[in-house]
Image (cartoon, rainbow, N blue to C red):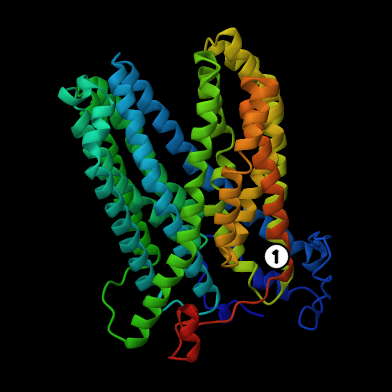
Amino acid sequence: MGCRRRGAVRRGGETCYHRALARRPGAASQTVRARRPASSFRVRLRMNDSPPELRASIGRDVLEMSITSALSLLALFLTDILTLTYVSRLHDEAMLAAVGVAKTLMFINSIVVTGIVVAGGRVITRRVEAGGTRLVPALAAQLLVVAVGVSGAVALVEWRFLDPIVGWLGDASASGGGTRPFLWLMLASSVAMALTQACAQLLRALGDSRRALAVLLVAAGTLAVLDPLLILGLDLALPGAGTAGLLAAAAGGAAGLWVVKRRVGLAMRLHLKLHRRAMAGFARRIVRISLPYTLGNLAMPLAITFMLGQLAAFGVSAMAGMALMDRVLQVAYCLYFALPSALVPVFSRHLLGDDPGPGRASVMAAVRLVVVHGLVVWAVLLVAAPALAEAFVLSAPARALFETLCRVGAGAWLVIGLDFIAVSVFITLDRAWWITLFSWLRASVGTVPFVLAGAERFGASGVVLGMWGGHALVALASIATATLLVRRARPARPTVADTGAGASPDARSLS
């Protein structure tokens, strides 16, 4: 069971799991254990299906991919906070509001692009693992073009509605202050950031998480340097913030293209009919996965909007406490938010293989990581909550809300973190419509009744905890479904896009 059979050339210290498996005594003659009946609800994943050396290797892979993805996301979160801090020194609320609007527009763009690049990376990972790398440069180029093109289309739609958006910010923003040029620059930077994001996910798809981290750190580091220089040093205010964002995104995109070109190669011209068929199948696979994933991601903002509307009835103090909690969540649980981008490449290498042991080992390694991280964060928040409330000078009601959320809410987030693993499983096993179903269940049944009941019984804290509790209950159903799918997973059938081999009827399986 050698690695040459799988066709992928491993670089940069990547682990070869097939050698570890081949060293297992009697691996060639091992038979797959009988599965439990489909009606059984005992869906525990058995770790003894793979040798200890293999489990340790997969565990290291899960840890490295997750941590590097989390660090890149954390860097972007922190630079956004720094941008807001520098603009706040201009003492103009309209400018602060403009930054908030720009981040919202970029977030919508990022939701769409994330679905595309995660789906494309999943397909490329499967193609490499199935053997041969002939089409990878062409598939990589197509993924980058699709990501940038879709991001540009979304930015164009957002640009079309800039006039009413600027009007919402008030007369001062509409008449001056550089709001309109700032929003133009930020829309352009969202397209450049899509290129950066796509390059990083391409590298993760090939197991090169460290270079993916380096690409995103180039963008974050450039922004951290240019923001204070242009906003405060050269006194460019909002246009300076927009220019810094565009230059940082462009730097990240250029670095990503350079690394992908050296690591993978990019082929823009295709001449063979077989290649064109594989490329068309690749595009269909991207749509098949990214569409339900994106539709699912659009549900969460609606749930948050409903929750904030109910919370606003309890006054400004409650909103201030929630604003601080939101920043804490971004930093404390960035590992959870980064899990789909990190785990889909890992699961794609193992869940669809001939041996179910490595796939289950990778899922269990992710579960252990989420549980340990959630418990550590919970303990830190229990200790640090009073100090954080004191540092941000919260009023008594805001402080009470914040500390309650830290004490109780972290338990719900531990379950919600496991749901991100379920999302990764759905994408890997090409069952992405489960994401749409559970996301909208979470935004409706898991939000509205729990928020209303929590507000009625516990006040402001009940609003937020009610939403988190409802989301955790829906997450349990999502986790159970993903676990059953893992147990029933079958080896993926190779296709033309997977192997790059000659024309075969399997090419139709991509459509």
Q: Nearer the viewer, residue 61 or 371?
A: 371
Q: Nearer the viewer, residue 104 or 48?
A: 104
Please state the horizontal and vertical placement of residue 305, each as a whole percent of the image. 49, 34
Residue 302 to residue 297: above or below: above
What percent of the width, then of the height, locates residue 211? 45, 53
- Outermost residue toward the left? 175
In screen coordinates, is 169 left or right of 22?
Answer: left
Say if residue 23 shows up in the picture.
yes
Q: How many labels does the image show?
A: 1
Kindly identify the residue that appears in the image at 84 percent across and 76 percent down.
34
Amino acid type at image mark 1: Val
In this view, the residue in front, 475 or 388, is 475
Q: Residue at x 30, y 24 (%)?
A: 228
Q: Name the residue under label 1.
A: 486
**Quarter of the rendering containing residue 106:** top left
Local packing at callout 1 (Cα closer than 10 Å; few below 14, some 14-19, many 20+) is many
Q: In this view, does 239 lie above or below 442?
A: above
Q: Is mark 1 on a helix, strand or loop?
A: helix
Whether residue 346 is visible, yes or no, is no
Q: In x, y percent, where is residue 502?
A: 44, 91
Which residue is depicted at the point 32% across and 53% down?
151
Left or right of 277: which side holds 419?
right
Q: Quadrant of residue 129?
A: bottom right
Q: Which of 297 and 427 is in front in this view?
A: 297
**Whether residue 132 is situated above or below residue 369 in the rendered picture:** below
Give the image location of residue 174, x and y in percent: 19, 26
Q: In which quarter of the image is the C terminus?
A: bottom left
Q: Quadrant of the N terminus?
A: bottom right
**84 on left or right of 29:** left
